[in-house]
Image (tube, grey):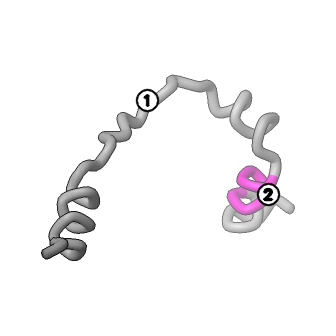
Amino acid sequence: MRRGRRGKRRRRRRRRRRRRRRRRRRRKDRKISKPHISLGLGKSIGEV
């Protein structure tokens, strides 16, 4: 007998842990690298 379901479940359990590295960035740099975010912020503040 094949234990297909159990095998799949066992395989699924194996998960890679993703470590999120937080880089310290100046806000100005971020605005340059991601303009769409700065645009969203500007809209909320009132600077379009």
Q: Specify the quadrant of the image occupied by residue 47.
A: bottom right
The residue positioned 23% from the left and 73% from the top of the image is 4
Question: What's the residue type where badge 2 is placed?
Answer: Leu
Gap between marks 1 and 2 measured at Cα: 25 Å
Give the x, y percent position of residue 15: 29, 48
Answer above or below: position of 42 versus 29.
below
What amino acid does circle 1 point to? Arg
Could you say which is closer to the camera, residue 36 or residue 13?
13
Q: Which is nearer the N-term, disc 1 or disc 2? A: 1
Is 46 one of the magenta-colored residues?
Answer: no
Q: Secondary structure at mark 1?
A: loop
Identify which residue is drawn at 86% across, 62% down. Answer: 48
Image quadrant assignment for residue 18: top left
**Residue annotated with mark 2:** 39
Residue placed furthest toward the front: 1
Give the farthest residue toward the right: 48
Does the stretch in magenta take in 38? yes
What is the magenta segment's predominant secondary structure?
helix
- Disc 2 crowd, CA 10 A, few/some/many (<14, 14-19, 20+): some
Q: Residue at x 18, y 72 (%)?
A: 2
The residue stretch that appears in magenta:
36-41
Q: Which residue is mark 1?
A: 21
Q: Is residue 31 above or below residue 23?
A: below
